[in-house]
Amino acid sequence: MSLNRGDADSIGDYALVDRLGSGGMGVVYLGRSTSGRRVAVKVVHAQFAQDEEFRARFRQEVAAARQVSGAFTAPVVDADPDAEQPWMATLYVPGSTLSDTVARDGPLRGPELRSLALGLVEALRDIHQAGLVHRDLKPSNVLMAEDGPRVIDFGISRAVDNQTLTVTGRLIGTPPFMSPEQFASPRDVTPASDVFSLGSLLVYAATGNRPFDGESPYLTGYQVMYEAPVLDGVAEPLRSIAGRCLEKDPAARPGLAELHRLLQALPDSEAPGAPTAPIVQGAPTAQGAPTVPGVAGAAETRRQGSPARPVPRGLTTAGGKGGTDSTRPGHGQPRRGRRILLGLAVALAVTAVAITALKAGSQSPAAPAAPSALVTPPPKHVPWDYQIGGAYAPQSGVRVVSRSYEDAPSPGAYNICNINAFQAQDGAERDWDSDLLLRDAGGDVVYDEDWGEAVLDIRTDAKRQRIAAQVNAWIDECAAKAYKAVEPDNYDAFTRFPKYLTADQTKALMKLLSAHAHDKGLAIAQKGTLELVADRASVGLDFAVVEECGEWNECGQFAEAFDNNVLVVEYSAKGLSQACSGWSGTLSIVRRDESVVPKGTGGYLHETC
């Protein structure tokens, strides 16, 4: 991808040529030295340069990467962790990531799989001999170079005896490729943790599927800790080897020397009749998150045939209700604080501590599908306003406005029509047929208690068609009022009610809404829901409206998935500061009060970068 407006021309002694990737914590550029040598330059975002803990962690990353110089890692060639914006340059390694390779060409077979496995064992040997534990071995951190794999990104590695830099209360890693001990006791991981991650990675390489693949990151974490891995399609002897690597008890896993001997016995060619498992259409690619760093495990989609799982005890949703607009009870209120927590300790800012940096030479993500020719997405990087709690005259210069479908568009602006698509309005259950309201085993309606909204039952195609008919009638109203786009709210309802709803059901309904919106000449927004950004093109979504991506270090993932066509609304000074520091030159950003009340109402707040 090309450089963005506002990117520096150079850093240190390196001219910056292209962007290789970006995320909530920083940007990775393709750089060139004065002699013409190509390097991958990782530059952290300016706001983190003021954070002493982050600086200490970045120094640790540089030191860790410098200690490892094996044939299967990317060596550090230069760094300045004390610069105004800390940076590190590593050798540029041409080649796709393992995740991109499998997504493009399918699972690895025969000698290619054997070479990968042996190369990764040798890379881990070099890492462990340097006294380090990588802690984030996953497909997007493995480059497929011509002469063998390269393990990259030491952003969350640490010395085995270093107990000081693990962020209190947060897990750091990528749930589908983390070990049980990373969830239970992240300060106490040993090299055996990387062996567990290697087992998961090899299953993915051989099948295109992950052995732990919940409907959301926190359910994936539960599977890692308590459930047996899914090894369908993994042929022997790799199946047995992977099974041993994936033992819950670290002491039961093989050491690297034993693993090397076992993997040397892998066949050089595919055995006749060896079982295979096709990649499930629409399933997320390897890393379980956008190839650009950020909250890991995003875009979780359950494999076909995998049973829905109830929410385990100890795994909860944390919710806080913002202020209420009494004139519009429950309508489109910001879902502030709805972040899935791992009951063992985490806000899933999980991988926000480390950019999938050193992703040097990986292929850029595929360009998103273009919207309908009759659809006009909102302009990028412009002043905008979020008025879903009540309409008022926007400030001078505002070019995009989001309002409730009940209100008229703002004259002269690009207008987005907000509708509640997956839950009934507070007190409006009677507007829906009784059987379209989701019910529990006792027959009682399931409510989103934070917002007093009944959840809609989207579990069958017939019900989705009937729900879509009602929502599409609102979309027709939006079109009749001359709105340019629609914003279906509560796209993330399935993450709050995983006992009943799945991501596939959610996407199926959204596809119906997208098709209708496009038929009416309206663009359609994805409202937040980082879990589904990888599916935006297949679902038919044209741009994103995102709450608190600055607060939660998620702006980079949305920017990458939607080609910077992202409208950000923050509700705190911290969130606005972080969004502006990293994305003021790229995304449309506004801070509103938590109740998004109209101008002139008590509590009204409107700020920009």
Image: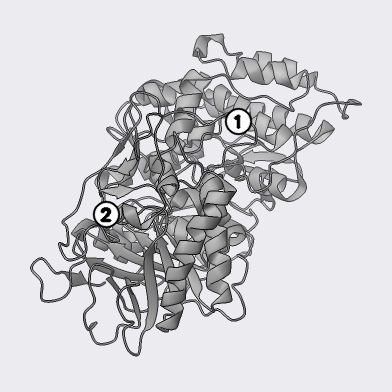
Q: Quadrant of the N terminus?
A: bottom right
Crowd rating for badge 2 (residues with CA inside 10 Å; few <14, some 14–19, many 20+): some
Mark 1, residue position: 306
Q: Residue at x 51, y 41 (%)?
A: 502
Q: Residue at x 78, y 23 (%)?
A: 235
Name the outermost residue toward the top. 252
Q: Position of residue 371 (x, y in %)?
A: 59, 72
Q: Quadrant of the C terminus?
A: bottom left
Q: Whole-Å distance between the Cαs marked 2 and 1?
A: 34 Å
Q: Residue at x 31, y 84 (%)?
A: 410
Crowd rating for badge 1 (residues with CA inside 10 Å; few <14, some 14–19, many 20+): few
Q: Write down the quadrant of residue 515 in the picture.
A: bottom right
Mark 2–mark 1 contact, CB under 8 Å?
Answer: no
Residue mark closest to the camera, 2 vs 1: 2
Determine whether the residue tagged by mark 2 lies in a helix, strand or loop.
Answer: loop
Determine whether the residue tagged by mark 1 lies in a helix, strand or loop.
Answer: loop
Mark 2, residue position: 426
Q: Position of residue 543 (x, y in %)?
A: 48, 68
The answer to whether residue 90 is seen in the rendering is no
The image shows a total of numbered marks equal to: 2
Q: Which mark is residue 604?
A: none
Q: Amino acid at mark 2?
A: Asp
